[in-house]
Image (cartoon, helix red, strand yellow):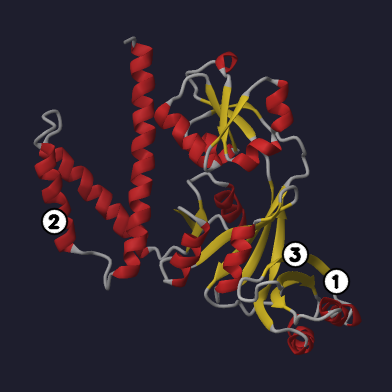
Amino acid sequence: MSLEKIRQKISHIDHEILRLLNERIELGLRTKRFKEKIQDTERESQVLKQLEDYSHAHSVLKIEFVKALYFSIMKESRRIQTSDQTLIGFQGEHGAFGEVAAKNFNPNLATLPCPGFADVIDDLEQGQLDMGILPVENSLGGAITEVNELLVSTDLKVIAGVKLRVNHCLLKLPERSYRDIRVVYSQPQALSQCRNFLNRHQLEARPFYDTAGAAKMLVKEKPRMAAVIANHLCAELYNLEVIKENVQDHQNNFTRFLVLARKEEKNSGDKCSIIFATPHKAGALFEVLKIFADARINLTRIESLPYRDDPGNSIFFLDFQSDSIHENIEKVLGKVKEKTVMLKFLGCYKEEVFQ
């Protein structure tokens, strides 16, 4: 093994150590919600004892060094827990577009990954998170069905909207040549959005569960002749090299996210969201929409999904704008309630667009 390769391996290990330290701190932030006080001396002693037992198998490391290192790690973990950071959950691995949207919404939030969309909802409902951010629609792919169905069954409120431009990048390992790439891993929708680019360069598309997950896998498993399609944040987080930016087929590709919380924020916003179902009769949907038309309220989105609680019927997702939010909307929603069999008010909020 050459000196250069040894140094490359050391750099990779250093990067992995920092990533794992960050993951440990994040878990510490979660444990805070279960403890009466931040410092648990009994638990810290237990951790140090386990490390002492484990370190005997590693003769290079002295126990004094291990203890000093972990004293510093636990001290930093306590400091961060004491800072009372607001925790926001997103679906996927670090570097997912949900995390990008959360950081654009508020860069001071602590972003925590969750395996699935339902996990974001569950952790928020149980108080492990302060906020959650979920994608509801994409300008090319349409509504994200699973998320919209989750909104039907939760009592969480929408407190903000984030419309994020989706820019895909082709990423590779720093030590690999782009000329050797034959296979590209990414989330199926991302691969579909870059189909022309992949075909033009004769690259084989291989589906992976998540764009950021593909980036993480590339660093960990180092598959031969492989690259990934992900975003710039993934390049930074996983120490990957950007071969080409904006490889998506359509440049006007936006994903819209909703920020959720347990309580509605009382500040006024320029957009509102509701979910409703109408009776089984002709013209029922028209009667609801006419209420908004008569009130001169602009509708910005209407989607329908099958209503699982009423087979054969549909449930509607409606977004609308209003300048005089609370006073006017209460009257309008009162009329809507008379014409529907189910009405859920998700909230009024501000929505920002990020390029």
Identify which residue is drawn at 30% across, 59% down. 78
The mark lying in front, picked from 1 and 3, is 3
Mark 1 residue element? loop
Mark 3 residue element? strand
The mark lying in front, picked from 2 and 3, is 3
Would residue 283 appear left or right of 343 to someone viewing this image?
right
Q: CA distance from mark 2 to mark 3?
A: 55 Å
- Tally of numbered discs: 3
Q: Please say if 282 is above or below 31.
A: below
Q: Quadrant of the N terminus?
A: top left
Badge 1 crowding class, 10 Å Cα cut-off, few under 14, some 14 to 19, many 20 or more, is few
Please say whether residue 50 is visible from this viewpoint: yes
Amino acid of disc 2: Ser
Please say whether residue 157 is visible from this viewpoint: no
Badge 2 crowding class, 10 Å Cα cut-off, few under 14, some 14 to 19, many 20 or more, is few
Amino acid of disc 1: Asn
Q: Mark 2 or mark 3: which comes first in sequence?
A: 2
Name the foreground residue: 306 vs 124.
306
- In the drawing, what numbered circle is on residue 45? 2
The mark lying in front, picked from 2 and 1, is 1
Name the foreground residue: 348 vs 148.
148
- In the drawing, what numbered circle is on residue 298? 1
Identify which residue is drawn at 44% across, 30% down. 219
Amino acid of disc 3: Glu
Would residue 82 appear left or right of 134 to someone viewing this image?
left
- In the drawing, what numbered circle is on residue 66? none
